[in-house]
Amino acid sequence: AVVSTQSGHYGRGALRSNRLLLLDTYTDIQIWIGRQIKDSSEELLAQTKLFVQQITEERFPKPSLSVLHDTANTNRFVECYLMPLHRDNKTVQMTTLPELAELSESDYEDLLAKYEHIQSKTFNQWLDEIRLIVSSSIPF
């Protein structure tokens, strides 16, 4: 099994369908399984759960563990966490996450298609609202 630990930028293709992703937010751990490896993921999932036990052995409080599949509605948290700009325009997306430019147009469209059902605001939309509220409350 290949274990890669990253913090900060999650890199291009974190949610590709041929991957298993471990997302650790300290209080919650999600294991996301892509649809192409779903049927052959039992051993990899077992190894990943063992890895989670090892890294959380001394952690308090113990994080909750969720296993999510690419095609399930419950994977929305992982999708939003990794790509919180799903409803921003393409210029904002490319500026915020330059790794998107490395995807082919087809892969980029496939990635965006996963977020159509999500109505929550993106981080940039939320921040723009905060800026508007703050700027309108400052007397000039």
Image: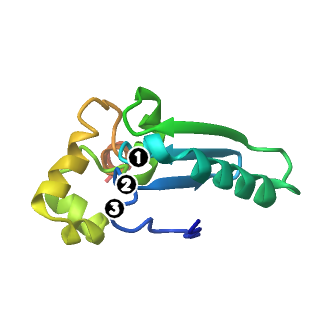
The local crowd at label 1, few if under 14, some if 14 to 19, many if 20 or more residues have their Cα within 10 Å, is many
Question: Residue sitting at 20 percent across and 66 percent down?
Answer: 103
Question: Residue sitting at 24 percent across and 68 percent down?
Answer: 95
Q: Which of label 3 and label 1 is nearer to you?
A: 1
Q: Nearer the viewer, residue 118 or 88?
A: 118
The local crowd at label 2, few if under 14, some if 14 to 19, many if 20 or more residues have their Cα within 10 Å, is some
Amino acid found under the numbered disc labelled 2: Asn
Disc 1 marks which residue? 34
Amino acid found under the numbered disc labelled 1: Gly
Disc 2 marks which residue? 18
Discs 1, 2 touching: Cβ within 8 Å: yes
Q: Is residue 69 left or right of residue 55?
A: left
Q: Nearer the viewer, residue 78 or 35?
A: 35
Disc 3 marks which residue? 13
Amino acid found under the numbered disc labelled 3: Gly
Q: Which of label 3 and label 2 is nearer to you?
A: 2
Q: Quadrant of the N terminus?
A: bottom right
Q: Quadrant of the C terminus?
A: bottom left
Q: Is residue 2 left or right of residue 118?
A: right
Which structural element holds mark 1?
loop
Which structural element holds mark 2?
loop
| Mark earlier in primary sequence (1, 2) | 2
Q: Which mark is residue 46?
A: none
| Mark earlier in primary sequence (3, 1) | 3
x and y percentages locating residue 137 in the rendered image: 38, 43
Discs 3, 1 touching: Cβ within 8 Å: no
**How far, Cα to Cα, is label 1 from label 2?**
5 Å
